[in-house]
Amino acid sequence: MKKTHVWLLLAGFIWLCSSCKSEFEKIRISGNQDLILNKAFEYYEKGEYQRSQTLFDLVLNTIRGSEKAEKAYFQYAYTYYHLKQYMLSAYYFKNFSNTFTNSNSREEAAYMSAYSNYLLSPSYRLEQSNTKQAIDEFQLFANLFPKSPRIPECNKLIDELRRKLEQKAFAEGELYFDLRQYQSAVISFDNLLRDYPESPDAERVRYLIAKSAFLLSKNSVIDKKLDRYTETVNRCNAFLEKYQSGKYNKEIKELRRDSEAEIKVLRKRLKVT
């Protein structure tokens, strides 16, 4: 008896699924544009975004310029967002914003285009084109809608994304340092401080610049040592002027002392006054 009951329930479930699928398929192949569009809206409101998207795909090109086109394109973009297809949602929200310039939904679409790129932004260790794209779009949004209540959130997300780019730059500088490519490390860290002068890692960055400069000097050919040790002393002095105390100060003073000692030896050897 129990086994029969289970089979009846299973059969009922299969029939129900088949019935639902059959209804959708009938709509999809009906060729009735009004029915397909209305059902696309209906599926969207029910949260059935894949079905809604499938039906929108069938009619969007045929409803351009119609009264319902704006709503359809807007919800179509959102189906990609809800399905976590953020690359396409960014594209379609941006397209909506550029097409429906007088729409009341334009502001939201512009924001969602930027936010979709934000969601595509990967770990700082990976390639950051989506991060840069998101920053550009949030900044464009702020320019287009300076009075939007979304501006504080945009600024917060821009700061978060810029911090990620900063971490990327710091990791690249550290990689050069670890690979003993000290000149590249100095250039990379200098660029970081130029682009992110308020970096929370600034003290360590300046320490690594001074240390890279010292190690570059130490491993240079004789003709370049004097200039490079002199540059190291300048880097050390700049660090100590900015940071009166801290965990790197003792080592920086040692690097400066060793560099000054090398400069004296080199001047005697090269007969430089």
Image: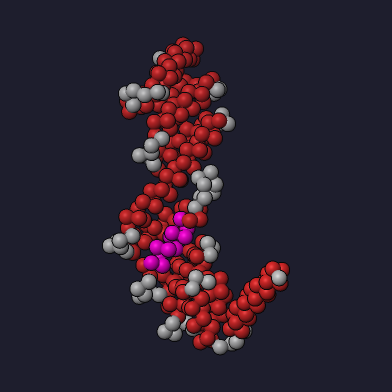
Task: Give the quarter of the image for residue 202.
Answer: top left
Q: Is residue 267 magenta?
A: no
Task: Give the quarter of the image for residue 111.
Answer: bottom left
Q: Which residue: 47% across, 60% down? A: 116
Q: Main secondary structure of the magenta part?
A: helix
Q: Which residue: 51% across, 34% down? A: 174
**Residue reaching furthest to the left:** 147
Answer left or right for 90 relative to 58. left
User: x%, y% of residue 32?
Assistant: 56, 88
Q: Which residue: 40% across, 65% down? A: 110
How many discs mark residues in the rendered view?
Answer: 0
Q: Is residue 136 visible?
A: yes
What residue span does the magenta drawing correspond to?
Answer: 108-118
User: x%, y% of residue 91?
Assistant: 49, 66
Q: Is residue 272 visible?
A: no
Asked whether 175 or 35 is in front, the reply is 35
- Position of the N terminus, as image quadrant, is bottom right
Depicted 154 relative to depicted 271: above or below: below
Asked whether 89 or 248 is in front, the reply is 89
Q: Which residue: 35% across, 39% down? A: 198
Colour pattern: secondary structure
Depicted 37 relative to depicted 259: above or below: below
Q: Is residue 111 magenta?
A: yes
- Position of the C terminus, as image quadrant, is top left
Asked whether 195 or 165 is in front, the reply is 165
User: x%, y% of residue 133?
Assistant: 46, 56
**Residue reaching furthest to the front:** 1
Asked whether 103 or 49 is in front, the reply is 49
Depicted 215 relative to depicted 49: above or below: above
User: x%, y% of residue 238?
Assistant: 36, 27
